[in-house]
Image: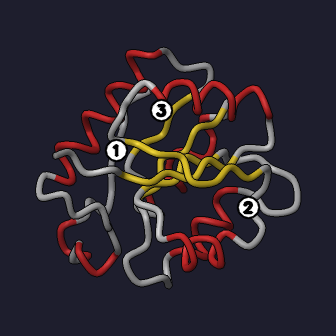
Amino acid sequence: MSMINTVIIIDDEPFARINLRMLIEKYTDWKIILELDNGMNVEAYVNQLKPDLIFMDVRMPQRNGISAATGLLSIKDAPLIVFASAFSDYALQAFELYALDYLLKPFSDDRFKQTLERLKKFSGSNDMSMKPADYPAKNFLKILIVRS
């Protein structure tokens, strides 16, 4: 028996939500429980529905994805977050907020599959929750020098 994992999609673009929905629906162990067009009240939805994973856009009206993800940090057993954005500018901020992945739109089916593979490797024991306390600060890289 396979475990069903629950997903919330948050994106202000209807076609982006449709694309994600079609990709997720290819996998029988994933179920979309909610779709939102902005980051408002995400904490309330997460507390009520207890999703395992959120696919979230970064640039949205009213409340952007970075702000919404920041609001989730205080929630016990917060879901994993995969950002899906057309803008690479926010990738560093996303990973600082413990994002599992950052999909740059438009992304391929293969790239989406890589994200799910990363999720499987990460979860291993079917424990889908990730929170800052699980990762002692001393294990994080403090400085990364990249030659341009």
Label 1 crowd (10 A; few <14 / some 14-19 / many >=20): few
**Would you say 45 lies left or right of 38 here?**
left
Most foreground residue, 30 or 39 = 30
Give the number of the disc on residue 24: 3
Q: Kindly identify the amino acid type of the residue bearing the numbered disc 1.
A: Ile
What residue would you read off at disc 2? Answer: 39
Q: Where is residue 138 in the image (x, y as percent from the top left)?
A: 19, 74
Answer with mark 2 or mark 3, whichever residue precedes in sequence. Answer: 3
Most foreground residue, 74 or 37 = 37
Most foreground residue, 77 or 145 = 77
Q: Position of residue 101 (x, y in %)?
A: 41, 43
The residue mark sitting in front, 2 or 1, is 2
Give me the C-alpha separation between circle 2 and circle 3. 20 Å
Answer with mark 2 or mark 1, whichever residue precedes in sequence. Answer: 2
Give the number of the disc on residue 145: 1
Give me the C-alpha separation between circle 3 and circle 1. 36 Å
Q: Where is residue 91 in the image (x, y as percent from the top left)?
A: 53, 44
Q: Kindly identify the amino acid type of the residue bearing the numbered disc 2.
A: Gly
52 versus 78 height, above or below: above
Assign a secondary structure to mark 2.
Answer: loop
Q: Which residue lies furthest to the front in this view?
A: 1
134 versus 95 height, above or below: below
Most foreground residue, 119 or 49 = 49
